[in-house]
Image: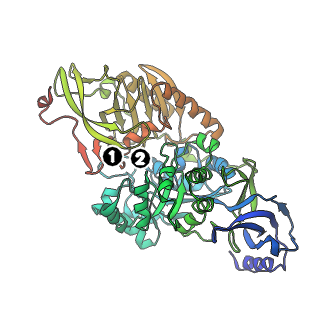
Amino acid sequence: MKLQERKELVEVALGKKLADLVLTNGNLINVFTGEIYKANIYIYKEYIANVVPIEEDNVVTGKNIIDLKNNYIAPGFIDSHVHIESSHLTPDNFAKIVVPKGTTTIIADPHEIANVLGIDGVKYMIEKSKGLPMNQYFLIPSCVPSVLGLENAGAEFTPNDIKKMFNLERVLGLGEVMDFMGVINQSKRMTKIIDVAIRKGVFVQGHAPGLKGKSLAGYICGGPISCHESTEGEEALDKLRKGMFLDARESSISKNITSIIEKIKIIKSLRNLTLCTDDREAGDLLKEGSVNHCAQVAIKAGLDAVEAIRAITLNPAQEYKLDKIGGIAPGYFADIVILDNLIDFNVMKTFFKGKLVAENNQLLDKLVSQTLEIENLNSIHLKELKIEDFMIKAPIQNGEIEIEGLVYLNKNDLLTERKKLKVKVLNGYIDISDSSELNYVAIVNRHKKIDNISLGVVKNFHLKKGGVGTTYSHDSHNLTIIYNNPLEALAISEKIKEIRGGIVVAEKTEILKELHLPIAGMLSRNSAEILSVEIEEMNSVLKKMGIEAESPITRPSTIALIVIPDVKISDLGLIDVKTQEIIKLFDEHGVNSLF
């Protein structure tokens, strides 16, 4: 705030100068004291000049006065951890749907697009988010690729690259440190990257799935101070007790808030609790909302309503040391949400920096966005493939053999386990045609100068027929294909190349459905309304093929997520997440695995 603005704000606060806007007759949710009481809010330009209990305010004067008619007044909502790319929307189209839901600030980690386009991808997200009626802050991706030597992405960030990117606008710190084993084992790469952030004095975001006890303590001592990967209460409680910021997540595929809140709701102080969406599809944002929905879920699970609001306002603001947001008080930015109740969190109005920007679930002003050059770049670089590329060569000619595979624990969880799977061999290749539980999986590197392909077998993926391929595949975003017949994998790879990225479903050689994501192979040019219909149609097809996950289109991308235990697959092969080793598919002696 400039000196002249401060002088004018003082005059308004003292009643010597008219406020631009007064919000009167509303029930203020005071996140500093935990009280709810009637108050008038005086706004001048972008700021709050004064907050006065209604019984102390005999004469209300201002250039404009809005009677809130006993509705609730809350600070603008803050999403403490989100990947915009997971909505498959550009930053401006993302803003169009979350601002009417009350979200005025997000902290985004653009590591998805960074894994494809490198530094240019980070710069694109920052440039595309300029001039929006919300704050879009960014963290610099710490793990591009997620684990060095275990996958090949489209870029590789060095400590020096990260140091330079800290100087970009609206950057708050270091993005989720996914290589948690690298932190615990003090690998040179992660130690140096975290040290750059600590020396810079910026925020270091964590990612510690399943870590407890000594391992968690070691991870925290390594530098990260937050985690959004907790899936159940005991794990969450341990992190809170150890002083971490707990970003409880309710994404399109990982819904963890209820189990967490049921365990921690009795804690006297939840100042380190925030709520986040992490990865949420456009359709879910439209139907359910953003962090307003997270708060609704938390309240239903037993969290006090004021604590839920703190978890999407003041707590994340303090987590990221964001000045003058997250509360309604003199000198704070006038980021304000009007709610009609504290149960379903229906947002009636959203104010951003003193201006009414959304009402009745609609953005009031049309956003003007220019097309950037990078949006027309083709990021799909696949070599000429043949059907043999998608067939697993066995060490025997015919018979039965054991192959190292990965097994999903359930239809929604990201967790998998390593297991030897009994498979048939026909004419020198693995044959799973008579199994209803097994699928092939292929990871095809789609980045420049690298043409690796790795193959494997997955159990309990629940793809009963056909195949599905996606270029939105955490975190390398290589082409991931799960299939029953190699013909499907070949047809999918050819169609993916043609449409410049996206999601494709095939049965044998027939393409059943395609979803175009031409920007970096992960973002659509369409609005949320159009895209959500496309995704719903794709999900419907995938469900008919057997995938009953909460988010069928997201399910394929999880198989390449080599930072989530216990075993996943990259373009280099089957990966043991905890030991960070590449697993051989067959016993070294091959024939000794015969039954």
Front residue of 209/25: it is 25
Residue 391 appears anywhere in the view: yes
Q: Which mark is residue 475?
A: 2
The spot of residue 337 in percent (x, y) is 70, 58
Report which quarter residue 540 is drawn in.
top right
Instruction: Give, as a three-letter code, the residue at label 2.
Output: Asp
Residue 260, placed above or below residue 317: above
Residue drawn at x 30%, y 33% is 455
Front residue of 517/204: it is 204
Would residue 131 be found to the left or right of residue 440 on screen? right
Residue drawn at x 85%, y 64% is 65
| Mark positioned earlier in the residue sequence (2 or 1) | 1
Quarter of the image with the N terminus in it? bottom right
Q: Looking at this rendering, what residue extends furthest in the front direction? A: 266
The spot of residue 361 in percent (x, y) is 72, 47
Report which quarter residue 530 is drawn in.
top right
User: Mark 2 and mark 1: span between their CA atoms?
Assistant: 9 Å
Residue 402, placed above or below residue 261: above
Mark 2: secondary structure: loop
The spot of residue 434 in percent (x, y) is 31, 19
Front residue of 170/64: it is 64
Would residue 197 be found to the left or right of residue 566 on screen? right
Instruction: Give, as a three-letter code, the residue at label 1.
Output: Glu
Q: Which residue is mark 1?
A: 151
Q: Are marks 2 and 1 in contact (CB under 8 Å)?
A: yes
Mark 1: secondary structure: loop
